[in-house]
Amino acid sequence: MASKEDASGWLWGWHAVEAALKNPDRPKPDLVLATPERAKTIAAIRPDLRVELADNQEIARKLPPGASHQGVALRTPALEGVSLHDLAEPAAGFILMLDQVTDPQNVGAILRSAAAFGARGVIIQDRHAPPLGGALAKAAAGALERVPVVRAVNLSRALETLSEAGWVSIGLDSQGQSSLGDVVNAPAMVIVLGSEGEGLRRLVAEHCDILAGIPMPGHFESLNVASAAAIALYATATAMGARVTGE
């Protein structure tokens, strides 16, 4: 059985691996394991790589229990994150910030939604976020290679930096006095989501320009953070698209 440390450098699942192989910014893998059929497809994408043939059980032994690898896995150095300055300039579009969202499935799903709706990037807290690989990459289905990620040590200071650069921050909070759809009206917006259980931390919430909730006519108490992110991204992308087209 692979330990957490052993598995942290692995990517698995076809969409995650294919996107990594096609990403020119991804370091060359240390090891690629694939079934014979998958190896043929990989050779067509990256003829420069040596692929070690393995059956499904051999691949599974390298990965955490239950990993759905789909006949392929690769061990690779982690992608380097982008700097906050690079993501912030120019101040246009929208960014997601995740305040201590630690579940890799949720973060991966959020990255997938961020790619789908055209977010400029995602900011995560450096110490309280899952590794950018493994189960997260599998859930992201290739979006990890497409969406710039900033690992920030202090999210409150990051919000201050973004504010100085012209960004308006909206914290998602069920107790917020505004409705999200009414406040996504700035040319550069940061949507801030809190952790799965605790929501936004007090200091992060205080650094947001606006606290807004998602209207829920069904009167359900809360949404999974990945679901909330998808709704927020859709609302933001739709509002910005409407302003661009003049609707």
Image: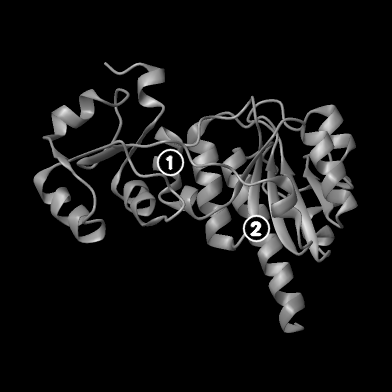
Left or right, 14 with respect to 158, comes to left
As drawn, 165 above or below 185: above
- Disc 2: which residue: 120
Left or right, 188 with respect to 144, comes to right
Q: Nearer the viewer, residue 83 or 224?
A: 83
SS label for mark 1: helix
In space, the residues marked 1 and 2 are separated at their CA atoms by 18 Å
Left or right, 124 with respect to 40, comes to right
Badge 1 or badge 2: first in the primary sequence = 2
As drawn, 42 above or below 109: below
- Disc 1: which residue: 137
SS label for mark 2: loop
Instruction: Mark 1 and mark 2 in contact? Answer it, CB < 8 Å.
Output: no
Which residue occupies 11% across, 35% down?
Answer: 55
* Residue 4 screen position, x and y as percent: 40, 19
Which residue occupies 29% across, 23% down?
Answer: 65
Instruction: Name the kind of residue labelled 2 in the image.
Output: Arg
Q: Residue furthest bottom?
A: 246
* Residue 219 screen position, x and y as percent: 70, 43
Instruction: Name the kind of residue labelled 1 in the image.
Output: Ala
As drawn, 70 above or below 92: above
